[in-house]
Every structure is written in C-alpha cells, then in structure tokens.
Amino acid sequence: MKKLVIILVCSVTGLLQAQFTSNQRRVLDSLNKIIDNPSAADTSRAAAYVGLSDILYIISADTLIPLCEKAILIAEKRLLIPTLSLAEKHQFKYIMATAYNNLGVGYNNRRDAIKSLEFYIKGVKLYSEIGDQRGIAQSNANMGDIYDNLGQVEKALDCYVKSLEVSEKIKDKPGISLALNNLGYLYNTQKEYKKSLDYLLISLKISQELNEINKLPYTLGNIGAAYFRMDDNVNALKYFDECLKMQKQNANRDGVAAVLNNMAAVFVSLKDFDKAVVYFKEAFDINTELKNKLGQEAVYIGLANMYAIKKELGPALENGQKALSISTELNYPGKISAAANVLQTIYLEMKDYKNAYKMQALYYSVKDSIQNGNFKKATIRQNMVFEFEKKQAIREAEFVKETEKREVIIKDEHARKNLIIVFIVAGFLIVIVFSGFLYNRFRIISKQKIIIEEQKELVEEKQKEVLDSIHYAKRIQTALITNEKYIDKNLNRLQNDKT
C-alpha cells in the first residue's frame, strides 16, 4: 500500500514494542500459549506463528521472518501426508499463503525487493489454488508497491488494477479503498494531480465509513502530497496535519517520520526554513532510530533542495550526495532519478559542468527506464482512463440508483409515519368524543338518580302519612264499638232469663 508520494514508508500499521493495546497483549498471550503447548494441533500452532507475525512485523523484519518460516515448515510437513483431508489441505495452504505474504512484507522492510516479490508471487499462487480472492487482491496491492519502487510502473499498474478488480468482484470495501488509494498515488507520480485527487477522495470516504484507522493516515498523506504538487500549500498542510495526528495516535513512528518530512517540504516551499529544519531533523532522528534508509534518503533529498534554494551549496551538495548513495544502494530507480536531478541543479550553480552533465545523463537514463518516453506514459494514462473511469461511471450510476432507492424508501417511510400519525390523532379524537359522551351520560344518570331518590323519599313520606291516618281511624273505631266480650256476656244472660 502506498503511503505518501514524497516519501514511501514501510508498512501499514504502526505498532511498536511495549506499545501494544491491552487487547493486542491479550492476543499475543493467547498465541504464545498455543505455540508453547506441545499438545496443540499443527494447524493451531502454524496459525499462531502467522498471527504473531501479523502483530509483530512492524517491530523488525528479524521478528517477522523466523515466525513465518516456522509456520511454513509445519504446513509443508503436513501437506506431505497423503491421507490429509481436503479441508486440512485448504487450511495449511491458506496458512502458507499468508506466511508468504508476510515474508514479502518482511523482505520489503529489509529493502530486498527481489526476494520480497518472490514470496508475494508464491502467496498469490496458493491463494489462487484455494480460491481466496481477498488474499489475491492484497498480495497484488503489495506487489504493486514493489514494482513501483523498482520503477516498473506498468507492472505496478497491472497489480493495482488486479487488486481493484478482485476487490470489486467480491465487494470487499477495504480492498477497494486500498486499490483506489494506490491508483491515486500512481496518478500523482504521473503528474495527473486532479485525477489523483478524484481517486484518493473516494478512497478516503470509504475508509472513513469503515473507520480504518490504520489506512486513513496514508490516504490523508497522499491527498496532502497531491495538493502540495498542485502548489496548494494550505490544503497540503491541512491534510498532512490530520495525517500526523492519526499516525501519532496509531503509534506508527515510521508514518510520523514520513509526514514530518512532507510537512518540512511544504515549509521550504513557504520559505519558512527554520521550521523546515526542525521538521527535517525530527524526521531524520526517527528514521535513524528505526534504521529506515529510505526515510533517511527522503530527508537528505529535502535538505538538499532547501539548501540549494538558500544558495548554501556546500550543505546542499553534501545532502544530495548522501541521498544518491542510499538510493543507489537500495537500487530504487525513482529515488536515483530524483537525487541525480537535485545534484545536477547544484553542480550547475557551482559551475561544475562536468559533474552536472554526469548527473543529467544519469537522470535521463533512469527516467527513461522508468517511463520509456512519452509513448509509455500515454499508454499508462490510456489504460488508467479505460479501466477506472469506466468503473467510476459504474460506481456513480450505482450510487445514484442507491440514492434514488433510499429516497423512495424515505418517502414511503414518511408516508407511513404520516398515516400512523393520522390514525393516532383520529383515535385520540374518538377517545375524547366517546369520553365526552360517557361523561354526559354519567351526568344525566346522576341527575335522574337524584330525582328518583327525591321522589322515593316523597312517596315513602306520603305512604307513612296514609298508614298513620288508617291506624288513627282504627283506634277511634275500636273505641266506639262495644266490647265483643260484653256483647257475648249480655246475650248469654238474656238466654238464661228466658229459660
């Protein structure tokens, strides 16, 4: 994965020894327990070695390489067993492919591009055998970086194209973001800065959506570099500053050094040389501590440019020669070309025309080997336009279609919500009306009950009066009528007298 245009840094993540998160330490402890367990299955032990290399590779190639070699050794022995099941063969091939890919990273950190490519190619072959598309895409992205460093731009482009095609095929958003970042970088090297920004900004949007905290700073750095090449120092510093903050948060000192060097170049452009020197020095100190020769070379180039602008030709020449020495040692044509170009300018200022001619010849010979004249550059540009503008148009069409679909869904949702609101309001009104009706009936019934109670009391009072009158009359009648016993007594006496 390309990190920054002005400086190429070494790796994607930024983990340093003793700076792991608590979760990473737990993973490390778990993997070490598996490795130390003699009864652990070979698949688990081999996978544990690869897992450790995934976490520890930023520390040094010396840490990563032996871990991957142990994983490969276990896998190779197991694959020789004729009775091994297809599922087990698949597992061990995947482990080997991942280990080869990590070895490619390790040897790239050692600046051994040829050996790095050798392992990447082995990894791609195994990924292809087991149908691991994501692995194929990642390995192609890594190989593209190597080919670009070697000045083989067309091969780099082929790898980036393959990485994008595979990632889009399996709808792998992180892979798409990575491929677009790499293509944006490549457009930048071809001085197609606007086109570079188009791809980098799309990559940035995807990475932000996915919250890819390890990838985001590199895309931000590439965007800053594109603006710097377009002489837009304000936006360049804006994106470099965001990149620097994230690299520090990620504890990626390699990335911090790279962006510090880029920011120093902007300050040189702004003629703020004192500030530039501070940033160059900090970047150089980190690169020296990390033994990053490519980073040191980039600082030497920046210092050579700055001193040449200031007409301090002694320091300019010294730094330019150091940059050429390292780039020649690393055998990176692009870096050799850049150093030769700076030295040519310095020698001309010093009126040393013999050495100026030598640097000019070196510059053009290396430049031709990288770009092979205008025809190759035109071919690359044509391939880029054909492959990626078509994909961009498809992506835009899909985006428009998806946007329209979302708008329809949103409208339907609004209509549904409005309908629900209408029903709720209508229901509420019905409840209010019904409650009013019930309250009114309650009041009427209450009044009727009161009237009935009053009438009942009146009837009871009248009934009492009638009964009282009847009882009174009965008492009078009883008083006036002769006693029944008296009558019986007289009748009996009369009858006795007759006899």
Image (cartoon, grey):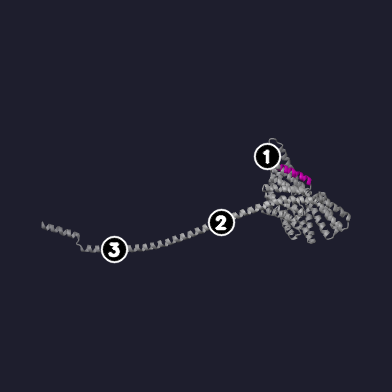
N-terminal of the two: label 3 or label 1?
1
State the mark number for residue 415: 2
Q: Which residue is mark 1?
A: 88
Q: Which residues are magenta?
A: 113-127
The nearer-to-camera label among 1 and 2 is 2
The image position of residue 38, as x and y in percent, is: 70, 40
* Callout 3 touching callout 1 (CB < 8 Å): no
Q: Which residue is mark 3?
A: 466
Q: Amino acid at mark 3?
A: Val
Q: Amino acid at mark 1?
A: Glu
N-terminal of the two: label 2 or label 3?
2
The nearer-to-camera label among 2 and 3 is 2
In this view of the protein, which residue sits in the foreground, 129 or 267?
A: 129
State the mark number for residue 351: none
Sort mark 1 into few (<14), some (14-19) or many (20+) by Cα contacts within 10 Å: some
* Callout 1 touching callout 2 (CB < 8 Å): no
**Is residue 4 at least partly visible in the picture?**
no
Query: For residue 90, what is the image quadrant?
Result: top right
The image position of residue 75, as x and y in percent, is: 71, 40
The image position of residue 254, as x and y in percent, is: 75, 53
Residue closest to the far left: 499
* Disc 3/disc 1 C-alpha distance (Å): 113 Å
Q: Amino acid at mark 2?
A: Ala
The nearer-to-camera label among 3 and 1 is 1
In this view of the protein, which residue sits in the foreground, 128 or 371?
A: 371
* Disc 1/disc 2 C-alpha distance (Å): 55 Å
Sort mark 2 into few (<14), some (14-19) or many (20+) by Cα contacts within 10 Å: few
Where 227 falls versus 75 (above or below)? below
Magenta stretch: helix, strand or loop mostly: helix
Say what secondary structure mark 3 lies in.
helix
